[in-house]
Amino acid sequence: MALAHGRPERHKVQIRKGDNVKVIAGKDAGKSGRILWINDRKNTVVVEHVGIIKRHTRPNPSKNVKGGIIEKEAGINVSNVMVICPSCGKHTRVGHTILPDGSKLRSCRHCKATLDK
Ligand SMILES: [Zn+2]
């Protein structure tokens, strides 16, 4: 792997898989959970226990599919969630702390604690 040099910024919202986030808009506003995955192209994230959709499936023995209702987390727009700071517990916009060596860390706008370990 080459060193990350001039790597393009993926998108302006600095959310990563595994982050704890709070939903701030949409029908699941107020819920919180962990980011399970991020869809960069559609700018959506899948949050644990948030945006559950129920999908009815028919049994299909040739494909070994059992019928019934599948519960699945649906993606929600990344702009509808905010990172929860592990230090102060508030949902926050993500700031940056530049270290003396030039590396960037994500930080909480409230308490300035770093969001990265
Ligand atoms: Zn904080």
Image: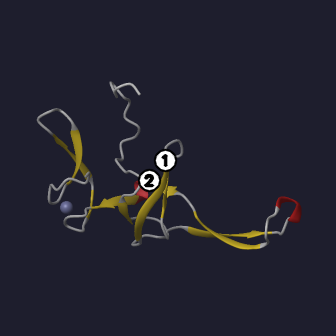
Drawn side of residue 9 relative to residue 104, left or right: right
Determine whether 5 is above or below 58 in the image. above
Q: Residue furthest bottom?
A: 68
The answer for how far apart the CA atoms under marks 1 and 2 are is: 6 Å
Determine whether 95 is above or below 82 in the image. above
Drawn side of residue 92 relative to residue 43, left or right: left
Give the camera-side residue of 42 and 57: 57
Name the quadrant where ligand 1 sits.
Answer: bottom left
Residue at image position (25%, 52%) is 117
Circle 2: residue type: Val
Q: Residue furthest right?
A: 62
Tell me the number on the disc at residue 43: 1
Give the camera-side residue of 106 and 95: 106
Residue at image position (20%, 53%) is 114
Q: Secondary structure at mark 2?
A: helix
Q: Would you identify the image quadrant in which residue 1 lies? A: top left
Q: Residue furthest front?
A: 1
Drawn side of residue 31 relative to residue 110, left or right: right
Residue at image position (36%, 58%) is 19
Report x, y in % for residue 51. 53, 67
Q: Are marks 1 and 2 in contact (CB under 8 Å)?
A: yes
Determine whether 106 is above or below 71 in the image. above
Q: Would you identify the image quadrant in which residue 87 lies? A: bottom left
Report x, y in % for residue 56. 74, 71
Q: Would you identify the image quadrant in which residue 6 lies? A: top left
Quickly name the residue at label 2.
Answer: 78
